[in-house]
Image (cartoon, rainbow, N blue to C red):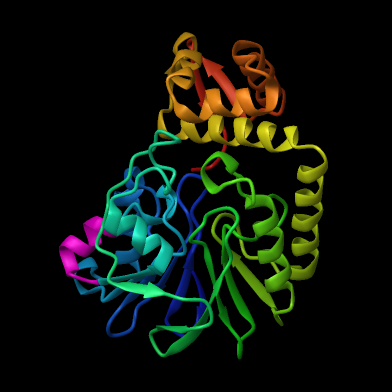
Amino acid sequence: MQPQEILPDVFFVERGYLNANHFVYRGDPPVLIDTGYISGFNETARRIEQLGVALRDISLIVSTHSHCDHIGGNRRIQDLSGCDIAIHRIGKGFMDQRDDWATWWRYYDQEAEFFQATRPLDDGEFVGIGPYEFEVLFTPGHASDSIVLYHRKRKILISSDTLWKDDMAVMTVRVEGSRAVWEMMASLEKIRSLDVDIVYPGHGPPFTDFQAAAERGLERLQTYLRQPERIGNDVLKKIMIYTLMMRPGVPEKRFFPLLMGTHWYKETVDLYFGGRYEAKYEEIVEKLKKRILLKEKDERLFTTVKQ
């Protein structure tokens, strides 16, 4: 996928599900928004440098939240360039305290590195992406430090994981707390009032049906409140796929024991499905195979989802 110039010298770089999308301002000095997953750093660096930006020249990284698929390149780029890193002040607190639980890293058995968060962001302030001023809007729910970035004049919304077109990011109430679904609803209601022509999400391509996407998200959240087990199924499907992206080719006979060794799998099944660990595993694997999201080759498991 070729980078798209969304404003003069500001490029949208679409990745996949494992690596979050990036935004690159290639002026002087360069600025980045989100840096992907740590294992994809070489590809991240290649795509940034293809735009004529040297990593050592980057002056600022803006992180939309502290999950591993959005901050994987932060430490390495900061080590090269000495750049500032801006993140919501809650995320800065996670970095300052070396909190690998609130960031999900330890909970979901993910690889990530702490970095120096030098600029705390607050709701309603503005951050400069080169000459373009984007408003910071605090949107907790999926992550307690989530923000979106809004360019009012151009009606551009960088929605990160707060709003996707046809799906929703995982809701992890065991880390984010029992209020997470209500907080996510409030965040979607908050951004619905914006005048938006185009949305650039954290994963997937841009889209223009902003209000319809927000409405779909709110309907999904209402369903979660009526049927909490839907949250559990969503977590199991998405994080099992995510795990296979991080560990492609896991021997099938080792996948279930691997999941049982994590915090998230047992807690999710305990919370929503009465501790039926193996039965739930077999059910989800079968559903993913039927949807061709998971395949087996030489007794190893792979996902077909784009990284």
Q: Can residue 164 be seen in this view?
A: no
Measured along the vertical axis of the image, is residue 165 above or below residue 306? below
Q: Name the main secondary structure of what is drawn in magenta.
A: helix
Relative to 115, is 207 on the left or the right?
A: right
Residue at the (77%, 49%) spot, across then down: 220
Residue at the (27%, 52%) spot, across then down: 114
> Of 65 and 272, which appears nearest the observer?
272
Q: Give the range drawn in magenta.
A: 74-83
Q: Is residue 228 visible?
A: yes
Give the residue at the far front of this rendering: 178
Whether residue 82 appears in magenta in the rendering, the answer is yes
Give residue 51's position: percent from left, percent from top.
35, 70
Residue at the (64%, 83%) spot, across then down: 155
Residue at the (57%, 38%) spot, across then down: 305
Measured along the vertical axis of the image, is residue 219 above or below residue 124? above
Give residue 87's position: percent from left, percent from top.
39, 67
> Of 178 and 12, which appears nearest the observer?
178
Relative to 19, is 100 on the left or the right?
A: left
Give residue 16's position: percent from left, percent from top.
51, 49
Quadrant of res 290: top right
> Of 123 and 77, which appears nearest the observer?
123
Whether residue 128 appears in magenta in the rendering, the answer is no
